[in-house]
Amino acid sequence: MAECYNFSKKISQYLDNELSKAEKIQFERHREECLSCRKKFSEIQTLVNYMHKMPAKKTSESFNVVLRSRLRKELKTPHKLSIPVIRPVWQLATLCLIACISVYTGMFIDRKFIRTFNLKPDRTSVYLRPIRQASLDIPKSDSKHFKMKNYVMDELKLSDIANMGRLSNYNTLQTTDSLNSNPPNTATFQTANAIVRF
Amino acid sequence: MVKKEYRKKDSDSDEELIQNFQQGDLAAFDVIVRKYKDQLLNFAFRFLGNQEEAEDVVQETFLRLYRNKHAYRKIAKFSTWLYTIAGNLAKTELRKRKRRRLVSISDLGYEEKEYEIEDTSTDTERAVDSVLKEEFIQHAISGLSNRFREVIILRDIQGLSYEEVGEILKIPLGTVKSRVNRARLKLQDKLKDIKQNKTD
Ligand SMILES: [Zn+2]
């Protein structure tokens, strides 16, 4: 059985002429002795031969015309980013770097804001960064149609943030200085820029 | 510019071509396209099993070459560099398709339709080795995971050397060899399954 296992591991190297003379002899001997390995070998050999002869697909006739028009467009709008193919590892690394920077800058955020709405930045991946004073209001009933412009901030739930996250990566939030000094259901906050990822 | 195109010969080495292109010779780009569009298409088609998506991948490959011509360095063989770009794009396309399929399965309730094989052969044609029909193989290939799929296409369909496959996939030669073997064994198993399902 161990011999059969070794045999199956070497089928391709045999077919591609990659075995040493001694290995080749051993391989052929087992092939003679073992019916099931012989069968397996011949199946793989047929398969490989067939694939080598499979008809090649060709580009369609419009290929050049389409490419040309795409290139023309390309020339009209020069690329801001000229990155070769980024491997997934690097994409991940870049994402991590962005996340780290966001978390770092997010450390300046008013803690009260996080406490008030029970946001846990580490668990919800909400990164907040203060930018400037501004006003922003969100109607309670309209969280799905959240827009950037002056809404009355009534209640901001995690679900609202989730909706915002889907609408846009960057939203401006207004955060309070003091909940008590303002009219009910209105909060004045330090403004923050949020990057919400899920 | 058109005349210049004809002056360029396909026999120029790839490295000469890309070098000329890097220096602004657009005719060299045309030669590269002419030389590689069909083999890249075959590669992408075998990967994706769909002509339209495959063409798009090849188009995008050339656009990236155009955009990033200076990213190519002489350390790699030009053809393997191009294959790496096309391969990455094909894999991205597969991921996109998986996402689309997730949506469409829940929406429309179909799943396997995409891979159904039409059997139009007559009884006599349906001989012992009928399982080795192109569509069966294509079907079996699309059942392989990406890492097996890519080695089998590069090695057995595109006919590249182990060294070239290693360079394209950035994996050591020993890994290429063992992976090619495992991929062939798996492919053969898949073909058997397909044959079984056909006769059941
Ligand atoms: Zn055996």
Image (cartoon, coloured by chain):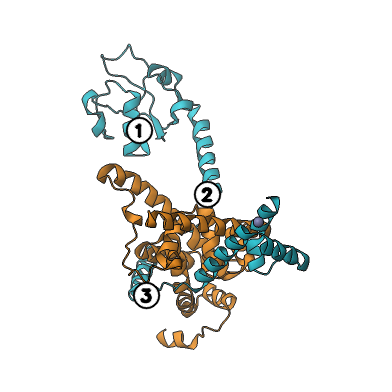
Chain colours: A cyan, B orange
Q: Is residue A42 left or right of residue B100?
A: right
User: In front: A15, or B55?
Assistant: A15
Q: Could you tell me how far apart the alpha carbons at marks 2 and 1 are, in whole angstroms?
A: 30 Å
Location of mark 2 (residue)? A88
Q: Earlier in the sequence, mark 2 or mark 1?
A: 2
Would you name the residue on which mark 1 appears? A172
Circle 1 residues within 10 Å: few <14, some 14–19, many ≥20: many
Reply above or below: A31 against A128: below
Q: Are marks 3 and 2 on the same chain?
A: yes
Q: Does label 3 lie on the same chain as label 1?
A: yes
Give the crowd class for mark 2: few <14, some 14-19, many >=20 residues within 10 Å. few
Label 2 within 8 A of ligand 1 by Cβ: no
Mark 3 sits near ligand 1, with its Cβ under 8 Å away: no
Q: For mark 3, name the chain.
A: A
In the picture of the structure, the residue carrying the numbered disc 3 is: A64
Residues B102 and B144: in front is B144
Q: Nearer the viewer, residue B162 or A75?
A: B162
Residue at disc 3, secondary structure? helix
Q: Position of residue A133 (x, y in %)?
A: 36, 29
